[in-house]
Amino acid sequence: MDPTLLWYLDRSTGLLLVLLLGAVTALGVLTSGGRPAGRLPRFATQALHRNLALVSLALLAAHVLLAVAHEYVDIRLVDAVLPGVARWEPLWLGLGTIATDLILVVAVTSGLRARLGGRSWRAVHLSAYAAWLLGTLHGLGIGTDLGWSSLTAPSWAQAPFLVGVALVVAAVGVRVVRRPAGDVLDPTPTAGALR
């Protein structure tokens, strides 16, 4: 397959991931704590959160495999698994690797949630916030098509980052504003939300 096509597919999956993971994270923020997200029933937003997360997992797998497959830069499979060992952009690629590893841990523990118990699952699931942040930083730092090396040139590729971050910031804002007086902001869902 054409290496240039693989490179563009890799970049496209990364940009789409930034947007999707922003939406998944925002939905997670809105549905945590056992409260419904707006006018939609909680089960609907949780189902959307779960289904978008599954689509994101598939897209993440494609992104990693495409990054390893293309020949534009030298990214080895070990670079996608172990942070900090990459020859090309070790910091930014390492952030993406950590984000990927965290997402995989969250996905596996979500599949085992009934066996782990709510408290253990919630503790691990909180790392999804770190995964989103690290993945976003990975894209900003490694995204050569962003034109952000000097932070001067606007680019069409900035839109997914701006929208993804805006979704998460807005969700946190809504969550804080909707919080009842005297209620502590707890990012973990209640037992009722786990059913």
Image: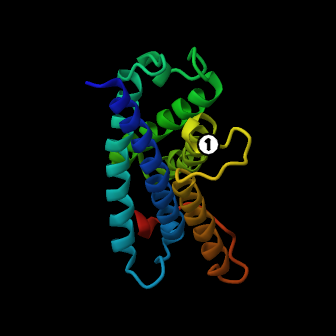
Work out whether residue 78 or residue 50 is closer to the camera in this orientation and state it: 78
Residue at mark 1 = 140
Residue 72 seen in the current view:
yes
In this rendering, the answer to whether 87 lies above or below 161 is above
Residue in the picture at 60% in, 41% down: 134
Work out whether residue 53 or residue 89 is closer to the camera in this orientation and state it: 89
Quadrant where the N terminus lies?
top left
Q: Number of labelled discs?
A: 1
Q: Is residue 100 left or right of residue 158?
A: left
Residue in the picture at 65% in, 26% down: 91
Residue in the picture at 55% in, 65% down: 167
In this rendering, the answer to whether 69 lies above or below 183 is above
Residue 81 seen in the current view:
no
> Neighbour class for label 1 at 10 Å: few (<14), some, many (≥20)?
many
Q: Is residue 5 left or right of residue 173?
A: left
SS at mark 1? helix
The x and y percentages for residue 109 are: 40, 42
Work out whether residue 80 or residue 143 is closer to the camera in this orientation and state it: 143
The x and y percentages for residue 133 are: 61, 47
Among the 4 quarters of the image, the one containing residue 20: bottom left
The x and y percentages for residue 13 are: 39, 43
The x and y percentages for residue 169 are: 63, 65
Residue in the picture at 43% in, 67% down: 193
Give amino acid for label 1. Leu
Quadrant where the C terminus lies?
bottom left
Farthest residue, direction front: 153
